[in-house]
Amino acid sequence: MIYLVTDSALSLGRSLVNIVAAALRGGVGMVQLREKEITSREFVELGRAIHSITLEYNVPLIINDRADIAQIIGAEGLHIGQSDISFKDARKLLGQSAIIGLSIENIEQARKARSWGVDYIGASPVFATPTKIDTAPALGLKGVSELREVVDCRIVAIGGINKSNIRQVIKAGADSVAVVSAICSAADPYLATKELVNDTII
Ligand code: TZP
Ligand code: MG
């Protein structure tokens, strides 16, 4: 499954709503709204606009960081990192039906996340990427395989993944692949998504 993570700053001046719509037509199975540079009010407005399209495709919308915004717009889930609110608090706030994903950077964090019952772990980053530079060292394909052996929860791989390496990431054991620039910065986000989706069928 291809999981689109948004970044307006990487969308080459195009409307994020149009990019998400193209990615949904192309077959993404999950969308995460990850916007670091906008106000809370803009985040809510954009979230509502994007949610209305993801609902048409029956694709879950996940909000990055902001449990309050996930709740306000009725999004299907929340994605948190190691320094965000805790998984326990997020679950308490959003309830059992919410999809809650947690980024992990090593096996220890993955084990803990598994024991808490997260819905998926974001294995981050698989490869070094200019999209996010304040990351832990890259896990590499070996890191993904190790995670696959140790934890039995869903693994969403993220970081530097594109059509040149996606098959290897899936072969290493990722259940899904999350991408930012491979779709948001693509000349044709619809075609780019379709190609990535085809590549997941090994
Ligand atoms: N978390 C870890 S790497 C990353 C995030 C949000 C960015 C991935 O972006 P790209 O463009 O798919 O490498
Ligand atoms: Mg975060």
Image (cartoon, helix red, strand yellow):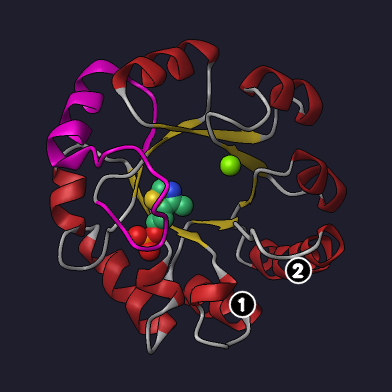
Q: Residues within 10 Å of mark 2 (few under 14, many from 20)?
A: some
Compare residues 80 and 24 and report the one nearer the observer: 80
Which stretch did the figure color magenta?
A: 128-156
Magenta-span inclusion, residue 153: yes
Ligand 2 resides in the quarter of the picture at: top right
Q: Name the residue rendered at 18%, 25% in the picture.
A: 146
The answer to whether one can see residue 202 in this image is no
Q: CA distance from mark 2 to mark 1?
A: 9 Å
Q: Which mark is residue 46?
A: 2
Task: Specify the quadrant that holds the C terminus.
Answer: bottom left
- Image position of 80 (left or right of 110): right
Check the image and report above or below for 78 versus 75.
Answer: above
Residue 45: name its quadrant: bottom right
Q: Position of residue 114 (x, y in %)?
A: 44, 17
- Image position of 102 (left or right of 105): right
Q: Name the residue rendered at 25%, 57% in the picture.
A: 200
Compare residues 28 and 39 and report the one nearer the observer: 39
- Image position of 99 (left or right of 156): right
Q: State yes or no: discs 2 and 1 in contact (Cβ < 8 Å).
A: yes
Q: Which mark is residue 16?
A: 1
Give amino acid for label 2: Leu
Q: Position of residue 148 (x, y in %)?
A: 23, 27
Q: Which mark is residue 104?
A: none
Check the image and report above or below for 61 versus 113.
Answer: below
Q: Give the mark, 2 or 1, whose residue is nearer the N terminus.
A: 1
* SS under mark 2: helix
Give amino acid for label 1: Leu
Counting labels gives: 2
Magenta-span inclusion, residue 180: no
Q: Name the residue rendered at 42%, 55% in the picture.
A: 132
